[in-house]
Image: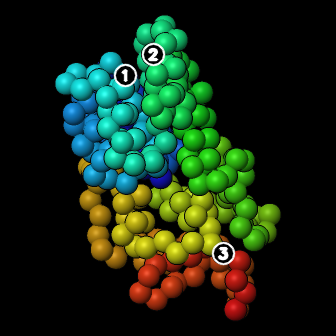
Amino acid sequence: MRILIVEDERRLAANIATLLREQASFAVDISNDGEDGRHMAMTNPYDLLILDLMLPKIDGLTVLKSLRAAKVRTPVLVLTARDDTGEVVRALDIGCDDYMTKPFEMAELLARCRALIRRSHGQSEALLKVGALAINTASRQVTIGGKNVALHAMEYRLLEYLALRAGEIVSKSDILERLYDFDSENFSNVVEVYISTLRRKLDPGPGYKLIHTVRGQGYKLGEQPE
């Protein structure tokens, strides 16, 4: 999952980014003004946008209007320091999906982010199940046939994304865009490496696979005995 934070309070933005990276294994980008944030949200695929309303250059409501007018459907969580019900109502009417008033608890922010991302993929519960595979997106616990599976952060990030899109073909380029933020280096064969590692850890036995290669198109997570 990849998230964009548009927040001009640099310390707050950095703290949110650290929380999302360390406790949810998300890739995170940060913008500190509305003009740059709008450009980033328009030109990159994100699973969630965390948007402050009081921003330099372009305010958050204008950013939100522009995104929805351009048919950008990324879920938006609005942050506001103002105790202004009218402003919140305007943001909801324009198309934000949720809001939080500063100051807020980081644990609640994290829970709201997870919920918005799940709902955008048609999932209401924190527990994702695909055949014998179970992923608790709140605790990041992964089991296969009831047995715990230890995954590194990037492996978990990839698996969660495939699970949210279970049954769909997910292209290599789409995966790369969700694995990394702007500051990360990536290599052309990294997807194949992580897919191979996940298969070794998840496949329950001979003649049965959960992660399937669709030649020339990408990968699909699903229970398809061979």
User: Looking at the picture, how far across and down is residue 108, in whole percent?
Assistant: 60, 27
Q: Tell me the amino acid under the disc marked 2.
A: Glu
Q: Secondary structure at mark 1?
A: loop
Q: CA distance from mark 2 to mark 3?
A: 43 Å
- Residue under pointer 2: 87
Q: Nearer the viewer, residue 75 or 50?
A: 75
- At 41% across and 58% down in the image, what residue appears? 179
Q: Tell me the amino acid under the disc marked 1.
A: Leu
- Residue under pointer 3: 222
Residue 127 shown left or right of residue 31 in the figure: right
Q: Secondary structure at mark 2?
A: helix
The answer to the question of whether label 1 and label 2 lie on touching residues, with beta carbons closer than 8 A, is: yes
Q: Secondary structure at mark 3?
A: loop
Q: Nearer the viewer, residue 141 or 124?
A: 124
- At 71% across and 67% down in the image, what residue appears? 130
Numbered mark located on residue 65 in the image: none
- At 45% across and 31% down in the image, what residue appears? 94
Q: Nearer the viewer, residue 68 or 28?
A: 68
